[in-house]
Every structure is written in structure tokens, then in C-alpha cells.
Image (cartoon, rainbow, N blue to C red):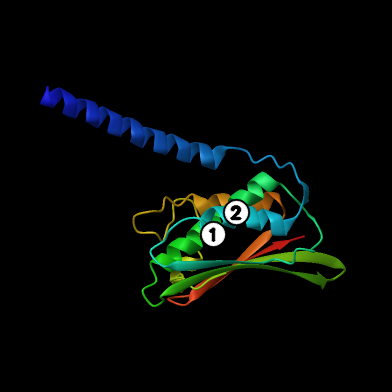
Amino acid sequence: TDLLNQKKQDIYADFDKLEVFLNSVLDYTKPIDLSPTPTHLFSLVEQVISHYRKKTYKKTIIFANQIDSNQPLLHLDKYYFFEVLDNLIINSIYAIEVNDHIQEGIIRIGSSVIQSNGTTQHIISIEDNGCGIENNKLKLIFKPHFTTKKTHGNGRGLYIVQRILDKHKATVTVDSRFNKGTIVKIYIP
């Protein structure tokens, strides 16, 4: 019976691996069909970070929603944009927890508006004081299966973030300093 139980455990483990693999394939191939609606960015950010404020972390983490609550509504797909913000915040939390150079972490989410050549762009910034990303890895972070997380990452998150932003016709920049932190800026037309 011990051998039989071990075989069952091995089969269940194989099924779990297969499920992870299939979910990965589906994430990469699933079409992203947007349903944009007028979205109050302050409320959306608050919805995302309220979940994380309730959790316990290895370090104290302050979540600062610095979005102007009177900012005009943005035309976004709330579901997908929630996923974008959620992924970026999860990455910031991880970066803070592994940064041995700080005692307390902070994640700031802010926004601004710029006018250029007759067009308006809304900029959303997500800033943390986490471990940062080494320069030689920055150009790879949006590639499928690339991760800087040694044991926690699968390399799907930022790839999907990039796909969602592309569908919104938004662009993203990442400025990171190793052991200092990262600022991700999303430019929405």
C-alpha cells in the first residue's frame, strides 16, 4: 500500500504540473477582448491595494494611492486594467520583501497628465523602494517565461501586462536601480 500511495502522489503531482503548463499556454494564446468603460482611476487603484493592505508581510509596507480623486475618467477595460495594476503591485511587494537594504517598504501609485503635439496622455506611475532590477535584465522583463524571482515567478505576469497595455494602445517604461527601487510608468492616450 505504501508503494500504491506513492504512485498516486506521483500521478497527482504530474497532473498538477500539467495543469500549470496548460494554464501557461492558455494565458499566452487567449485573445484579449477589451470592453472599455469610463473608469475612475482612484477607485480602481483603491480596489486593488485595499486587498494588499489587509495582508501581513515580512516587512512593513505602506501603500500610497496618490491618484487625484478628481481626475477625469479614463476609458479602460476595468477587469484587464485591474490585472495590470495587481501584477505590478505584486511585483513591488516581492521586490520590497527581498531588499535587505530597507526596513520599511513603500509602494506609491500616482498619476499625471501631459499634453504633447495636441494629444493628451495620462501617466500612471507605480513606484517602490524594492530591490530593483539589474540593467542587463531590464530589456527582458516583458518576455514570456523570463522572471527575476528565484522561486516565485513563472514569467507570465509582465508578458500579459504588456499584451493588455498594447490592446489599450498604452505604452510602458521601467526605470530601475538595483537595491534602490523601480518606477513603472504607463502612458495612456
Q: Is mark 2 on a helix, strand or loop?
A: helix
Camera-side residue of 137 and 98: 98
Residue 25 percent coordinates (x, y):
48, 38
Q: In this view, does 78 lie above or below 170?
A: above
Location of residue 9 (image quadrant): top left
Query: How far across and how far down the image is residue 2, in percent?
Result: 11, 26
- Frontmost of labels 1 and 2 is 2
Residue drawn at (62%, 38%), measured in percent from left and top?
31
- For the residue pair 154 and 50, the one nearer the viewer reads as 50
Residue type, numbered disc 1: Ile
From the image, tell me which residue sits under label 1.
Answer: 89
- Give how far apart the Cα atoms at labels 1 and 2 are: 9 Å
Q: Which residue is drawn at 40% across and 33% down?
A: 19
Count of numbered circles on the image: 2
Q: Is residue 39 above or below residue 32?
A: below
Q: Is mark 1 on a helix, strand or loop?
A: helix
Residue at far left of view: 2
Residue type at tag 2 = Val
Please determine whether, in this image, residue 3 is positioned above or below residue 47. above
Whether residue 142 is visible, yes or no, is no
Residue at position x 63%, y 63% from top?
Answer: 172
On the image, numbered disc 2 is attached to which residue?
Answer: 48
Circles 1 and 2, Cβ within 8 Å, touching? The answer is yes
Looking at the image, residue 16 sits to the left or right of residue 42; the answer is left
Residue 171 picture location, percent across and down: 67, 61
127 with respect to 21 (left or right): right
